[in-house]
Amino acid sequence: MSDKIKVAVSGNRGSFSEEAGKWYLQREGLDGEIIYSIDPEGVLCDLEAGKAEIGIYPVVNSRGGLVMDSYEMMGRHNFKLLDHVVIEVQQCLVVLPGTNRGDIKQFASHPQAFAQCEKYLLNNFPNTPHVKWDDTAKAAEDLRSGKLSPNTAVIASAVAAKNNELEIMEKGIQDARPNLTTFLLVKI
């Protein structure tokens, strides 16, 4: 096949969905291009619009349980299951460079990341509010671009931190080890 296969992922650059998509392409020996669809609904909409041939989104995590927005979206679209991928997810506490722990006034991330880091957050930041974001990597990008206040900490991947020139205050803040997420690969 001379053309690259387009894979729509539920996330931004640096998301765990991107990691799962790249892993799948490598495993299958496919030359692919990642399309960043931000959320599960976006993945299936991009497939329906012909922007991608394969879609990938998370459905369950070993600590956080079901990814509810994925399940809600699956009832609104027709698709065919191709495969699934399981990857280990390492969550990081990500901040703007120079931010100290005492500067953190809120957290922004996907509800799944909050669920995966629930004990850590309760033990270390018991009264710090959580702001729901569509994607962990998108929260990192929005912190860097100023869409989130500078006293916000994000729970995201090390890759999302690096992509956005953010500082990793702490790695491996997830409560479970291993912290496994299952992703579905689908087509229309």
Image (cartoon, helix red, strand yellow):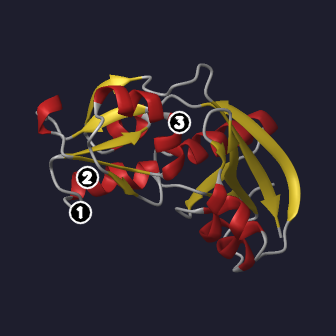
**Mark 3 to mark 1 CA distance (whole Å):** 24 Å
Residue at the spot 68% in from the left edge and 60% down from the top edge? 70
Which residue has dot 1 on it? 147
Image location (x, y in percent) of residue 129: 29, 49
> Residue 152: where, in percent of width, then height?
22, 47
Which of the numbered marks, if any, corresponds to residue 116? 3
Q: Earlier in the sequence, mark 3 or mark 1?
A: 3
Q: Tell me the kind of residue under disc 2.
A: Leu
Q: Which residue is mark 2?
A: 143
> Quick one: which residue is furthest to the top in this view?
177
Give percent across and percent down for residue 128: 26, 43
Taking depth in this image into account, of 145 and 125 the one nearest to the observer is 125
Asked if residue 161 is positioned above or below residue 79 in the image, the reply reads above
Amino acid under label 1? Lys
Crowd around label 3: few <14 · some 14–19 · many ≥20 (10 Å)? many
Q: Along the horizontal axis of the image, is 109 left or right of 65? A: left
Q: Using a 10 Å C-alpha cutoff, classify the residue at mark 1 as few (fewer than 14 neighbours), some (14 to 19) or many (20 or more).
A: few
Of 3 and 49, nearer the camera is 49
Pointers 3 and 2 in contact (CB under 8 A)? no
Marker disc for residue 24? none
Q: Amino acid at mark 3?
A: Gln
Is 111 drawn above or below residue 116 in the view shown?
below
Relative depth, front residue between 84 and 153? 153
Q: Residues within 10 Å of mark 2 (few under 14, many from 20)?
A: many
Q: Of the residues tagged 3 and 1, which is closer to the observer?
A: 3
Looking at the image, residue 55 lies above or below residue 144: below
Check if mark 2's residue and mark 1's residue have beta carbons within 8 Å: yes
Residue 125 visible in this rendered orientation of the protein = yes
Q: CA distance from mark 3 to mark 2?
A: 21 Å
Q: Does 71 sit left or right of 36 as displayed?
A: right
Q: Secondary structure at mark 1?
A: loop
Q: Which residue corresponds to the image point at 67% horizontal and 54% vertical from the top-left?
A: 57
